[in-house]
């Protein structure tokens, strides 16, 4: 996903407490810098600030970052000559989405095999019920009106 010109992420959304791979092909890459670091933090106050050296590839400079909790992911780039790409003094700032905790299975929570079997059984029953409802809706009116006739199988010799 390209969020802004020359910055790409390997995901559609930036979600807190997850990993993201960032690729940078901006000014410092285009000016043939040998080393580029990403300087980043979280939230309005730039909490948990870190610098990570990015790996140079044919596709730009790349790094994998652990997104922490916060309202936003803020970052800028600098090269070995201390030249900065900070979005003309505005920095690059992207909102972070909260984790949907209802869908998480915590490490200390045990998912038993019995629970999985119950889920499978309920899924199969829901499928059977949907099929029965479909057949009733499709064929019941034909039976009542008398327009229902089975297809006759003819054999050819």
Image (spheres, rainbow, N blue to C red):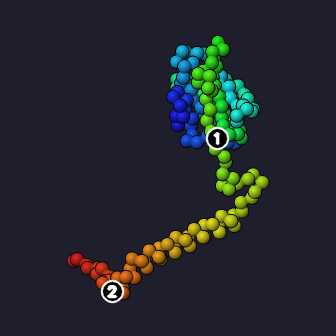
Apparent side of residue 154 relative to residue 7 in the rendered image (left or right): left
Q: Position of residue 78 (x, y in %)?
A: 64, 19
Tell us which disc is closer to us: 1 or 2: 1
**Depth check, front residue: 154 or 123:** 123
Apparent side of residue 129 relative to residue 39 in the rendered image (left or right): left
Numbered label attached to residue 118 = none
- Give residue 18's quadrant in the image: top right
Q: Position of residue 113 (x, y in %)?
A: 69, 63
For label 2, the residue is: 145
- Give residue 116's quadrant in the image: bottom right
On the rendered image, what quadrant is the C terminus found in? bottom left
Can residue 19 be seen in the rendering of this structure?
no
Residue visible at 56% across and 26% down in the picture: 24
Q: Position of residue 15 (x, y in %)?
A: 64, 43
For label 1, the residue is: 96
Choose the circle earlier in sequence order: 1 or 2. 1
Can residue 39 be seen in the rendering of this structure?
yes
């Amino acid at each position: 996903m390209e969020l802004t010109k020359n910055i790409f992420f390997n995901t559609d959304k930036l979600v807190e407490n997850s990993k993201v791979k960032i690729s940078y092909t901006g000014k410092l890459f285009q000016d043939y810098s040998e080393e580029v670091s990403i300087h980043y933090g979280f939230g309005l106050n730039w909490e948990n600030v870190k610098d990570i050296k990015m790996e140079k590839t044919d596709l730009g400079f790349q790094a994998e970052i652990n997104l922490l909790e916060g309202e936003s992911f803020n970052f800028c780039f600098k090269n070995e000559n201390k030249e900065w790409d900070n979005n003309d003094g505005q920095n690059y700032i992207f909102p972070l989405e909260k984790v949907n905790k209802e869908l998480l299975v915590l490490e200390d929570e045990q998912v038993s095999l019995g629970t999985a079997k119950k889920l499978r059984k309920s899924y199969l029953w829901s499928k059977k019920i949907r099929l029965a409802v479909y057949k009733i809706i499709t064929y019941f009116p034909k039976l009542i009106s008398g327009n229902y006739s089975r297809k006759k199988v003819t054999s050819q010799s």
